[in-house]
Image: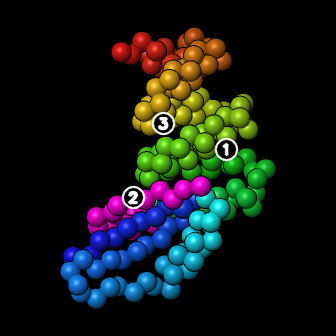
Amino acid sequence: MRAITYFIVTGICTVVFVSCSGGPTVAPTASSQKNTDTAAKIGEEADQNATVRIESPQELSEVAKVQQQIAAYEQQIQAEPQSEDTPARLLAVANLYMTRLRDYDKAATTYEYLIQQYPTWEHIGQVYIQLSTCYTNAGKQAEANRLAMRMLEIFPPDSQEYLYAQSLLKAP
């Protein structure tokens, strides 16, 4: 039986194969070796490495695909920072962090950045709702409540954002 360990280091993945049965260890591919080298360089700058245990190659494949999607969005954002699509791309990145990777800290940071940089974006209400959900999922209820109070201040009383914030504050 082989165990697969996956390290997330600021968006770069590294795969380490460990043989538990005394059998041969699977050698890394050229692309995984490149990712390992890149992750090692970035890891020196990171405060801590988050380690997630993955049980199956299918899960590893899914995580790698999500990481590739995030990287593609980030490249588009860097290439065209003034594009009208930038807020939507940032929202997509944050949603991938929250829903697919369950990395609530990176998701929250991205949602917060989006709110700060694009406060008048036509879909900013959705960003507030997603950030609230992110805080709740991360167990940061006090932050979710503060955000709900802010939503009550900035959104009209008949908006979905206002009603959502009210429901959050009334919840037990």
In this picture, residue 17 sits left or right of residue 149: left
Which residue in the structure is indicated by mark 3? 134
Which percent across, then down, holds residue 139? 42, 33
The alpha-carbon separation of the residues under discs 2 and 1 comes to: 29 Å
N-terminal-most mark, 1 or 3: 1
In this view, 7 is above or below 21: above
| CB within 8 Å, label 3 to label 2 | no
Q: Within 10 Å of the Cα at label 1, are there few (<14), some (14-19), or many (20+) other Cα atoms? A: many
Q: Residue at x 36, y 77 (%)?
A: 17
**Mark drawn on residue 162:** none
In this view, 108 is above or below 166: below
Q: Amino acid at mark 1?
A: Pro
Residue projecting furthest to the right: 82
Which residue in the structure is indicated by mark 2? 52
Of labels 2 and 1, the one closer to you: 2
Name the foreground residue: 126 vs 131: 131
Name the foreground residue: 171 vs 20: 20
N-terminal-most mark, 2 or 1: 2
Of labels 3 and 2, the one closer to you: 2
The alpha-carbon separation of the residues under discs 1 and 3 comes to: 18 Å
The alpha-carbon separation of the residues under discs 3 and 2 comes to: 19 Å
Question: SS for tag 1?
Answer: helix
Question: SS for tag 3?
Answer: helix
Q: Dividing the image into 4 quarters, which one contains the N terminus?
A: bottom left
Which residue in the structure is indicated by mark 1? 87
Q: Amino acid at mark 3?
A: Cys
Which percent across, then down, holds residue 165? 51, 18
